[in-house]
Image (cartoon, helix red, strand yellow):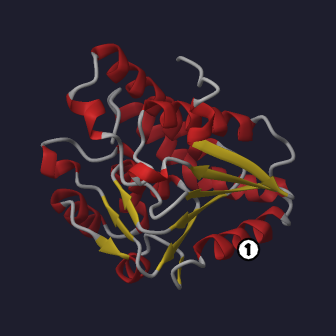
């Protein structure tokens, strides 16, 4: 995999707030749509978290008006084969890496979390949504399979029937419904998502790290095994 360049590093901002690492998707003019540079940098950030013993929790959020409006559609339709292959390799590595990180990850979601964005929320351990935010995995509407992370995780958070409906229709799930279905943990007033997510992350960071890691491992072990056994080497947007 090509390492992110100096310019690419701005695609995801990583900062430490005491023992909490905050990762901010940073392509606000494009609603944080995930181009190749952003996906490269995000994967690098997850590796940095894995290697940082001082990071006891992570908050994942987005700059500007959105959490993440999905992948860059041009990557699917117009990208050369080598770029599509790199995206597939990144995605194949990213999903199990996030699920096996020993530290808890809290999503702070405002605005749209679509496609790749909805998948990132699903892979997080806890999620806080603003009242005006929504989730959606619309791959089916473009003749594409669902995001592997949503297909993998959503049936474990809500019923299989509901998850199937959401992935077959690609419809929007507003914050209130997402909370009712069990897809997120908190709904806040718009603008308070990051504050609430940070408070949750700080609470988790203060607990014994070994216990937190063991709880997360117990929940995610079967998901990782299922993903590695059944997911094709394809990307998402």
Residue shown at the point (41%, 36%) measured from the top left: 35
- Relative side of 158 to 95, left or right: left
Q: In this view, does 128 lie above or below 148?
A: below
- The residue identified by callout 1 is 199
Q: Residue furthest front?
A: 29
Q: Is mark 1 on a helix, strand or loop?
A: helix
Residue shown at the point (57%, 31%) measured from the top left: 8
Q: Is residue 235 above or below residue 145?
A: above
Q: Name the spot of residue 196 as percent of width and height, x first.
A: 66, 76
Packing grade of label 1 (10 A; few <14, some 14-19, many >=20) is some
Residue shown at the point (42%, 53%) measured from the top left: 117
Assign the C terminus to one quadrant of the image. Answer: top left
Count the marks. 1
- Relative side of 113 to 126, left or right: left
Q: Name the spot of residue 2 as percent of width and height, x first.
A: 54, 17
- Work out whether residue 153 or residue 44 is closer to the camera in this orientation and state it: 44
Residue 97 shows up from this direction = no
Q: In which quarter of the image is residue 216?
A: bottom right
Q: Name the spot of residue 124 as percent of width and height, x first.
A: 55, 56
Q: Is residue 196 above or below residue 42?
A: below
Q: In this view, does 118 lie above or below 185?
A: above
Q: Name the spot of residue 59 as percent of width and height, x first.
A: 66, 59
- Work out whether residue 141 or residue 17 is closer to the camera in this orientation and state it: 17
Residue 118 shows up from this direction = yes
- Relative side of 178 to 49, left or right: left
- Work out whether residue 15 or residue 48 is closer to the camera in this orientation and state it: 15
């Amino acid at each position: 995999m090509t390492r992110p360049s100096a310019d690419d590093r701005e695609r995801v901002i990583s900062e430490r707030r005491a023992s909490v690492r905050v990762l901010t998707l940073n392509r606000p003019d494009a609603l944080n749509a995930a181009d190749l540079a952003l996906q490269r940098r995000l994967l690098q950030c997850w590796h940095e978290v894995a290697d940082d013993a001082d990071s006891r929790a992570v908050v994942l959020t987005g700059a500007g008006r959105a959490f993440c409006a999905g992948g860059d559609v041009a990557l699917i339709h117009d990208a050369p084969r080598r770029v599509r292959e790199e995206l597939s390799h990144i995605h194949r590595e990213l999903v199990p890496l996030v699920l096996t990180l020993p530290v808890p990850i809290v999503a702070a979601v405002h605005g749209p979390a679509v496609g790749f964005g909805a998948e990132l929320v699903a892979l997080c351990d806890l999620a806080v949504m603003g009242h005006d935010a929504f989730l959606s995995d619309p791959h089916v509407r473009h003749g594409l399979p669902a995001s592997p992370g949503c297909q993998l995780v959503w049936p474990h958070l809500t019923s299989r029937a509901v998850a199937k409906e959401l992935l077959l229709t690609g419809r929007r799930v507003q914050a209130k419904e997402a909370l009712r279905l069990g897809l997120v943990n908190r709904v806040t007033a718009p603008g308070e998502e990051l504050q609430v997510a940070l408070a949750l992350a700080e609470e988790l960071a203060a607990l014994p790290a070994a216990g937190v890691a063991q709880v997360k491992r117990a929940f995610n072990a079967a998901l990782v095994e299922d993903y590695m056994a059944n997911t094709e080497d394809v990307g998402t947007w």
